[in-house]
Amino acid sequence: MTRIALQSLRKEYAGQVAIPDLNLAIGDGEFFTLLGPSGCGKTTLLRMIAGFNSIEAGTISFDGTVINDRPPAQRNIGMVFQNYALFPQMSAAKNVGFGLQTRKISKAESERRVEQALASVRMAHLKDRLPGQMSGGQQQRVALARALVIEPALLLMDEPLSNLDAKLRVEMRDTIRQAQREAGITTVYVTHDQEEAMAVSDRIAVMNLGVVQQVGTPPQIYRRPANRFVAEFIGKTNLLERDLLRHDGKAVIELGSGYTLDVSGLLGPAASGRVQVSVRPEAVKAAASGLAAEVLDETFLGSHSQVRARLQSGEIVEFLEFSRRSALWKGGETVFLEIDPEQLTFFDAQSGVSIMQEPQD
């Protein structure tokens, strides 16, 4: 297992700054995900860790040793790419064993490790198949086994599931997580898919424009986003801008049509003024009274529905409907919404930074 320390990293392309000044620490055996939109710098950072990209400033350390000048072949890393990169003329077993040929591993040991690696991704029964005879998911399993078989100190994965259909992505992310846990290998995983990141990660670094916006566990990132960008990028949210008022020592926010919430326990004593409120759809439910809104539409999804409604202010709010009603809401109907204040996040309206009070232990 390997500890990774990235200190004051800077990356430029033809004078354009891609990563200005980045610091991260990744623990032994951790499944750490770099998450963000296209162009945010996550793949650039992964390639810097691998040694494929140059570094304009800063250091990359493995277990306390700076490896900036160490070539990729000497970093003891396993790589899983988006496009599988399998040799088409080689069977699954030979593809997996290819990396062992240059490591002077005995034939018997090589065969044992190949068999073990294929079994770990449930591909032992297809060891003699060529890539052209496999599905996309099967090829990705072979690519994962090939990365694991060399017993690397570090596993790097760059959008490995983006070429698979939705069902296969869910199946493969479970396979990847299980294989990583069994091997105990420190893993850095790149994706733009928020659900995927939350499903597999011990911790996530959310990136935008080469800057780390927040680092935390999936629940921390989702429930306590550090800023407006993280709140909007991770999952769905309704953003409402309001005035935070102080009455009799309490922090109160009025959401409309006389519907107010006491949010004193969420915010520090100095918080006031114009704020933005992040309201997750699951924090909202239809009720007998509350915040008045007009239903726009309802999308039935089996276990629940997604409902969009327009507040009297003109703002659109989405909420989830879990009741087993025989008919859907109709456009134009009036609905009253009840909001759980414990699931709200508040940001300064100007800076977009969270003004939430730290939870008490």
Image (spheres, rainbow, N blue to C red):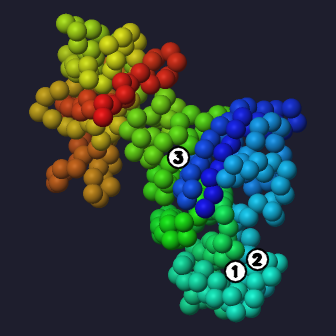
Residue 65 placement, left or right of 302? right
Residue 236 image-quadrant placement: top left
- Up the image or down, 242 lies above or below 179; here it is above
- Up the image or down, 277 lies above or below 4; here it is above
Name which residue lies at 75% across and 80% down: 100
Residue 162 placement, left or right of 353? right
> In this figure, which residue is indicated by the disc labeled 3?
204
Give the residue type that dot 3 points to.
Ile
> In this figure, which residue is indicated by the disc labeled 2?
99
Picture disc at residue 38 = none
Q: Residues within 10 Å of mark 2 (few under 14, many from 20)?
A: some
Disc 1 on helix, strand or loop?
helix
Going from N to C along the chain, the mark reached first, 2 or 3, is 2
> In this figure, which residue is indicated by the disc labeled 1?
96
- Mark pair 2, 3: CA separation: 30 Å
Residue 80 placement, left or right of 252? right
Give the residue type that dot 2 points to.
Gly
- Viewer-nearest residue: 126 or 66: 66
Disc 3 on helix, strand or loop?
strand
Name which residue lies at 65% across and 50% down: 4
